[in-house]
Image (cartoon, helix red, strand yellow):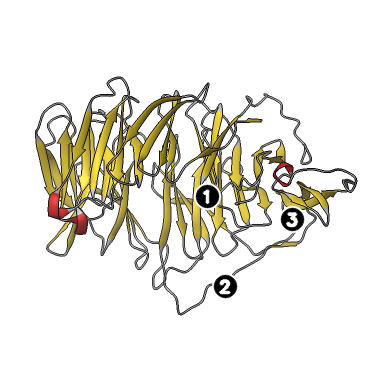
């Protein structure tokens, strides 16, 4: 991997959908950089500090959420003089998003009073009353023709289907939830999954015309669903629960065909490779060298020498660090809080929040755990390569960690004082965006060879 230098940021950063640009929030300034040269190609000044940014799907426009103001500003890359400002007045704005056609902006007011669709082509706007959530509860189907919007009225949850051309309500149906948490279209647009709040374990599958295809409830009298995700192929629906189990439903009968439990101790027989991150100090004698303090890398420890890390393959049995959440505090850190599918739908990675340093990788072909990565620090983010079976994760240290079916290894970030707290892929899997608290950098990622012979100490 090759790393760029670090650049300042004070908020969100993201690649454009066409991977040509990186948008960076720096206080009230929006900086657009070219991903090849990293030169600044556009610089826009907003009216307040930027809280949120989102690219339009055509990479032509970009919006900035100034939620403290509160207002939205949108900019055009090809027409820098063009600008758009959206202000809801006393109603405020809690969230904004683009429509799939890149010519409409959807805003949700404070207290979920209404959702408004603003057109960039003319001054028309459409209102949807009583949206259920601010940042959640809105999903577009794959071809971008329809939007499903959750609403609540008369103490009942509803799903409204809107046409993304006329923005008229094409249909509306009530859903059997006590307090709807979110919804998501299936990858083939044949169904919509809806799930209840954590207080009620309930997952409902609806057809777009409002027919309930299946109701799934794994158990009662306990905290329920925490994460839900369709597989990219559309054949599987993964459900992560507070009971520390991952359940997978098939799209034909909607029955559970796999249940995976995150055990605190893994014993034989187990076919999974368990990789544990360990320190590997390199004893370098620098006593006779006179070096400036700024020269020293972030992972240099004067008492031990230069610290590197690598993976060791553990022998069974293995016990993972386990954190029991306090019973008197809300939103307990337990259950499957991170869940992500590989591009080919063959693997799924999970993190049980009670064991935040362990990442589990499940093989959906053999219905067993394929690997477990045990880190020194809690896992902050884990993202799959959008083009192949390669997983990258970070823990807030100066290292990146990579897993492929051939093995796992650690990568050191050479930038001094740079702790990786978040990461994102660009769409073609050639570049990673890495975030620190007040800086970001990018790393070019070489293509994955067909037969990977990576070792844990590369």
Labelled pair 3, 2 in contact (Cβ < 8 Å): no
Residue behind mark 2: 324
> What secondary structure is marked by label 1?
loop
Q: Position of residue 158 (x, y in %)?
A: 18, 53
Left or right of 75, for residue 431: right
Number of numbered discs overlaid on the protein picture: 3
Tell me if label 1 and label 3 are in contact, CB under 8 Å. no
Query: Which class describes the residues within 10 Å of circle 1: few (<14), some (14-19), or many (20+)?
Result: some
Of callouts 1 and 2, the N-terminal one: 2
Give the left or right position of residue 35, taking residue 408 as reference: left
Q: Earlier in the sequence, mark 3 or mark 2?
A: 3
The residue at 55%/52% (across/down) is 380
Q: Residue at x 23, y 25 (%)?
A: 82
Q: Nearer the viewer, residue 316 or 426?
A: 426
Quadrant of the snapshot with the C terminus = top right
The single residue placed furthest to the bottom in the displayed view is 328
Query: Which numbered tag is attached to residue 27?
Result: none
Name the residue nearer the viewer: 131 or 255. Answer: 131
Residue corresponding to mark 3: 269
Q: What mark, if any, has residue 437 been given in the picture? A: 1
Q: Is residue 130 visible?
A: no
Mark 3 crowd level (few <14, some 14–19, many ≥20, 10 Å Cα): few
């Amino acid at each position: 991997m090759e790393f760029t230098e670090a650049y300042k940021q004070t908020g969100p950063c993201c690649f454009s959908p066409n991977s040509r640009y990186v948008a960076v929030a720096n206080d009230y300034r929006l900086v657009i950089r070219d991903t090849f040269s990293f030169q600044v190609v556009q610089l826009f000044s907003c009216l307040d500090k930027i809280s949120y940014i989102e690219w339009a799907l055509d990479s032509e426009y970009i919006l900035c959420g100034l939620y403290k103001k509160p207002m939205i500003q949108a900019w055009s890359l090809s027409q820098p003089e063009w600008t758009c400002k959206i202000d809801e007045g006393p109603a405020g704005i809690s969230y904004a998003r683009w429509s799939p056609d890149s010519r409409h902006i959807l805003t949700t007011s404070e207290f979920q009073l209404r959702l408004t669709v603003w057109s960039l082509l003319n001054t028309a706007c459409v209102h949807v009353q009583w949206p259920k959530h601010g940042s959640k509860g809105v999903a577009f189907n794959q071809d971008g023709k329809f939007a499903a919007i959750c609403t609540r009225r008369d103490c009942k949850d509803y799903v409204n289907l809107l046409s993304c051309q006329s923005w008229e309500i094409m249909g509306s149906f009530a859903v059997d939830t006590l307090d709807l948490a979110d919804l998501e279209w299936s990858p083939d647009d044949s169904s919509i999954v809806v799930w209840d709040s954590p207080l009620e374990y309930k997952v409902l599958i609806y057809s777009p015309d409002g027919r309930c295809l299946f109701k799934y409830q794994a158990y009662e009298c306990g905290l329920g669903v925490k994460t839900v995700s369709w597989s990219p192929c559309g054949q599987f629906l993964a459900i992560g629960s507070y009971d520390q189990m991952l359940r997978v439903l098939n799209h034909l009968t909607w029955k559970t065909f796999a249940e995976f439990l995150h055990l605190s101790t893994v014993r034989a027989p187990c076919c999974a490779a368990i990789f544990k991150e360990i320190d590997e100090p390199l004893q370098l004698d620098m006593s006779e060298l006179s070096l400036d303090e700024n020269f020293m890398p972030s992972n240099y420890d004067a008492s031990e020498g230069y610290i590197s890390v690598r993976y060791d393959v553990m022998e069974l049995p293995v016990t993972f660090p386990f954190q029991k959440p306090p019973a008197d505090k809300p939103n307990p850190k337990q259950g499957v809080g991170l869940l992500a599918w590989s591009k080919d739908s063959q693997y799924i990675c999970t993190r049980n929040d009670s064991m935040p340093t362990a990442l589990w990788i499940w093989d959906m072909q053999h219905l067993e755990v394929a690997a477990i990565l045990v880190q020194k620090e809690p896992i902050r983010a884990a993202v799959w390569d959008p083009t192949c079976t390669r997983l990258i994760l970070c823990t807030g240290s100066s290292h990146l960690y990579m897993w492929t079916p051939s093995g796992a290894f650690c990568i050191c970030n050479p930038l001094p004082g740079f702790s990786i707290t978040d990461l994102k892929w660009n769409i073609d899997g050639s570049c990673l965006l890495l975030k620190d608290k007040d800086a970001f950098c990018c790393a070019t990622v070489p293509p994955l060879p067909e037969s990977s012979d990576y070792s844990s100490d590369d």
